[in-house]
Amino acid sequence: MRGPPPGSYDRAVMAHVSRGLSALADRPVTATAVGALGVSTSGLFVALSATSPGTASFFRCVFALPLLVPLALAERRRRGAPTARQHGWAAGAGVLFAADALLWTQAIYEVGVGLSAVLVNTQVVMVPLLARVIDREPLSARFVSLLPVVVLGTVLTGGVFETGVTGTAPVAGTVHSALAALCYSVFLFLLRRGGPDRPPVQSYVTIMVSAAGAAVLGGALWGGVTLAPGWGPAGWLVLTAICGQVLGWLLVALGSPLLRVEVGSALLLLTPVAALVLAAVVLGQIPSALQVTGCVLILGSAYLITARPT
């Protein structure tokens, strides 16, 4: 008997994946919630891998590519290729993504899985500030009034006023989380420069390739990069790539644009909340009462800043 033509199995698998994603896109609340929960596992899996920031950042990008490339090829046949300008903006964004990943991974080890996820949400105040400085976009009265609340929440979450809190170096972890949030904000800013019509999956592949290269270079200067981390660490990083880099990102990208802004904002807060729960249950990282208060201030402000008034 003759076997199936070459590549038919891969095409069949990708067809099933595409149908599954399309079905979830018809349920945007479910897609966004599942995507946000998928992203929330990234910090836990990185912590369990116990690898250096450079190693974790490099492999979470590399392991995502075998899943993303077939989807990108399917998108290319359907929508065409990105322009050279869009590729350029995506490549630049990838460098910032690598910087974000390196800093955030360091913060995971210093301040804990859950708290680092909350602290990175301070990017909700950095994106409007960048838009104000570069594009002269006005700041809303709500944003200006909530900015001091976010700052206070950041200080409390980092455990600046306490001793014996979660993490090996909570103050350093807070600083690294804030810098990661800044890098992520610039990443989003550069990505927006690619235009709303950019093919998202192909742009994401460009970002992952660029980020992998930048992670190797940056990681070599910061803790080193282990190109053969072993089966155990590699397994955790594969899970990071699947749950966070691919499925989480795709589901959020599919679902959130179809929701009212306030609904999408609330669902995306599942990521830091779930990360806090996972850190407490799996790793025993229990935040103090003041740190919980700081988390509430940051996440509540993030929701109010990103949700439009009804």
Image (cartoon, rainbow, N blue to C red):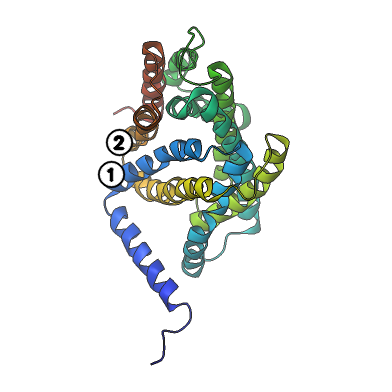
What's the CA distance linking mark 1 and mark 2?
8 Å
Q: How many marks?
A: 2
Mark 1 or mark 2, which is nearer to you? 1
Query: In the rendering, at what x and y percent does residue 84 appear?
Result: 65, 58
Q: Is residue 137 visible?
A: no
- Tell me the quadrant of the picture where the C terminus can be found: top left
Compared with residue 294, is residue 271 higher up or lower down, i.e. above or below? below
Find out whether the residues at labels 1 and 2 contact each other: C-beta distance under 8 Å. yes
Compared with residue 274, is residue 68 higher up or lower down, i.e. above or below? below
Would residue 44 appear left or right of 110 to someone viewing this image?
A: left
Q: Is residue 293 visible?
A: yes
Q: Secondary structure at mark 1?
A: helix
Q: Secondary structure at mark 2?
A: helix
Q: Residue at x 56, y 64 (%)?
A: 81
Would residue 130 appear left or right of 44 to someone viewing this image?
A: right
Judged from this view, the residue extending furthest toward the bottom is 1
Amino acid type at circle 2 is Val
Query: In the rendering, at what x and y percent does residue 159 appear?
Result: 48, 13
Task: Name the quadrant containing residue 271.
Answer: top left
Residue labelled with disc 1:
29
Bin the neighbour count of mark 2 within 10 Å (Cα to Cα): few under 14, some 14-19, many 20 and up: some
- Tell me the quadrant of the picture where the N terminus can be found: bottom left
Residue labelled with disc 2:
263
Q: Residue at x 50, y 39 (%)?
A: 46
Q: Residue at x 32, y 27 (%)?
A: 309
